[in-house]
């Protein structure tokens, strides 16, 4: 009888410990998922504000090329070939600002052409414009090791135009 009671108590304790461990693991997973969603939401919120600012500037008759003129930049490299980078290159195509090349992680390490890898040798330009705004700080630090020119965020440019 004593053994049955002891076995029952042990079973209940083990079951309780299993439930507690399950709750802890589930809470940790849900916290990580929640954090990922928060980061994505922040990123897309910033992108929305950026593109909204861009449209507003265009509606006011202002162009991004005025920023480059004001700062004496004639040759540009664009970091990031997502939607923002592509839009920037299209906007500068009809201006006297020369986009020499684009830098993107998806380009092969030894790529030669318009889109190059950040790991490849990077040609000198007057300025590099970083379009992945959520990663600007990290990207700027990496590029500073390789390049001796200003490295600016598209976000800063749009709010300065």
Image (cartoon, rainbow, N blue to C red):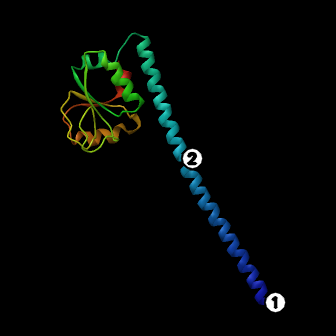
Residue 152 is left or right of residue 87, and the answer is left
Residue 61, placed above or below residue 104: above
Instruction: For the C terminus, give its image quadrant.
Output: top left
Comparing 115 with 54, the one in front is 115
Comparing 7 with 107, the one in front is 107
Residue 81, placed above or below residue 25: above
Residue 55 is left or right of residue 38, and the answer is left
Q: Quadrant of residue 153?
A: top left
In this figure, which residue is indicated by the disc labeled 1?
A: 1
Q: How far across and how far down the image is residue 93, in percent?
A: 31, 19
Q: Quadrant of residue 154?
A: top left
Is the residue marked by circle 2 packed among few (<14), some (14-19), or many (20+) residues within 10 Å? Answer: few
In this figure, which residue is indicated by the disc labeled 2?
A: 34
Comparing 70 with 51, the one in front is 51
- Is residue 155 at least partly visible in the picture? no
Disc on res. 16: none
Secondary element at image label 2: helix
Residue 149 is left or right of residue 30, and the answer is left
């Amino acid at each position: 009888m004593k053994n049955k009671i002891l076995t029952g108590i042990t079973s209940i304790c083990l079951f309780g410990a299993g439930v507690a461990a399950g709750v802890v693991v589930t809470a940790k997973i849900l916290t990580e998922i929640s954090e990922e969603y928060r980061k994505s939401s922040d990123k897309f919120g910033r992108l929305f504000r950026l593109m909204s600012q861009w449209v507003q500037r265009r509606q006011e008759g202002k162009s991004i090329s005025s920023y480059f003129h004001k700062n004496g930049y004639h040759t540009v490299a664009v970091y990031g070939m997502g939607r923002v980078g592509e839009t920037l290159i299209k906007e500068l195509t009809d201006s006297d600002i020369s986009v020499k090349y684009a830098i993107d992680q998806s380009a092969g390490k030894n790529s030669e052409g318009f889109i190059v890898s950040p790991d490849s040798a990077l040609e000198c330009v007057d300025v590099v414009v970083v379009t992945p705004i959520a990663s600007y700080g990290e990207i700027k630090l990496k590029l500073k090791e390789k390049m001796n020119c200003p490295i600016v965020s598209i976000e800063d440019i749009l709010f300065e135009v």
